[in-house]
Amino acid sequence: MFMQMSGASIAVGIIGASGYTGAELLRLAAQHPDLDVRLATGDSMAGRRAADLYPSLEVAYPDLVFGEFDERAFDGLDLVFLGLPHDASMELTPSIVGRVGCVVDLSAAFRLKDPSAYPTFYGFEHTQLDLLGEAVFGLPELHRDDLRGARLVATPGCHVTAATLALRPLVDAGLIETSGIVVNTLTGITGAGRAPTDTNVFTNIDSNALAYGLLAHRHTPEMEQEIGAQLIFTPHLVPMSRGLLATCAAPATSGCTDDEVNDALRSFYADEPFVAVIDAPPATKSVLGSNAVHVSARYDERTNTVISMCAIDNLTKGASGGAIQAANVALGLEETAGLTMIGLAP
């Protein structure tokens, strides 16, 4: 088992680095005191400088060129991030785990503990059941102890991160029912990926908002697994580049009060470095570009309903920042290393 103390250089590879989450990993790794990016692949962009595709990376990575995937390049690496399609990650991961200290997968290939959910929600049979059982869900606020020393981390989806952090403390406290929950999210266009589609071209997203994935969105079983409750989930795409706001409505249990709801959240997150329980409804701009999480909840006595809200940056805490946070824990580094708790505002 690889274990590295803070202060040493950790050789990093990013497989599938040319997408938005890959660019975000490069941005965050550049300000991390321990991570040294040695490899960044992006087959569709192989041969192109990273800074030509993302000029924001010019100062930190003037000579970084995206390469084609080569399995031999893993040798000598300590940490590998996978930014590949779900089925591709499932097929590739067995050849990496054990060769490097930690593999952090940003796809859903190893998130679900029930393999029977993959054909229904992802369209493929899961063939790596041993690794599926070994993988640790990469949300430190819930799984910190299991993450320590983990060889394979499955980073949660951005919607799942926000909804879980909004609801799990209330389920654990017994303040909301575990059925009849409604989760609605608003997400920035970067959640649709970098490749141009009918969904994310400017003329279709500008001044527009739309729901998608009705009734059977693939993140639903992941949410139910981590929240511990049955729910209906509807995401909405809105015309902003990045950010995610989850608004969750849950039936309250008998005797629930507004004070109990807020006390449960504040107690659950009292020692969490990135989570703030706030009084006002959270806003995505407040956490922009950061790994911060803003959570707020209210109990409505008239309808006996708890409204719990969570704002994150979908690319940072919801993807690449959360992946680095989990990797920090897995490798014995300072959990907050390379990550900011302050959003970019104004």
Image (cartoon, rainbow, N blue to C red):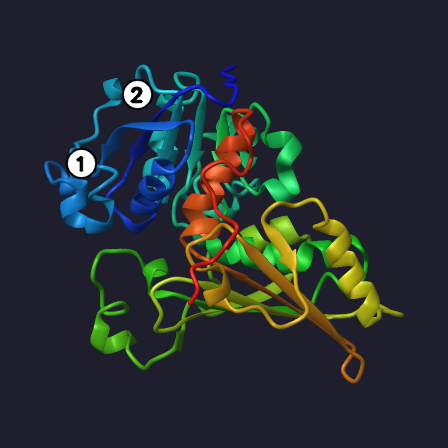
Q: Earlier in the sequence, mark 2 or mark 1?
A: 1
* Image position, residue 300 (x, y; %): 76, 79
Q: Nearer the viewer, mark 2 or mark 1?
A: 1
The amino acid on which the numbered mark 2 sits, given as a three-letter code, is Phe
SS class, disc 2: helix
Residue depicted at 10% across the width and 36% down the height: 47
Dot 2 alpha-carbon crowd within 10 angstroms: few under 14, some 14 to 19, many 20 or more: many
Task: Specify whether 125 is left or right of 292.
Answer: left
The amino acid on which the numbered mark 1 sits, given as a three-letter code, is Phe
Residue depicted at 50% across the width and 18% down the height: 4
Residue depicted at 59% across the width and 60% down the height: 294
Dot 1 alpha-carbon crowd within 10 angstroms: few under 14, some 14 to 19, many 20 or more: many
* Image position, residue 282 (x, y; %): 57, 68
Task: Specify whether 56 is left or right of 175.
Answer: left
213 or 309, which is in the foreground?
A: 309
Query: Which residue was labeled with disc 2?
Result: 74
Whether residue 171 is visible to the viewer of this picture, yes or no, is no
Task: Specify whether 225 is left or right of 344.
Answer: right
Q: Which mark is residue 66?
A: 1
* Image position, residue 299 (x, y; %): 76, 74
**329 shown above or below 176:** above
Gap between marks 2 and 1, in whole Å? 15 Å
278 or 166, which is in the foreground?
A: 278
Residue depicted at 41% across the width and 50% down the height: 122
* Image position, residue 129 (x, y; %): 50, 30
Q: Are marks 2 and 1 in contact (CB under 8 Å)?
A: no
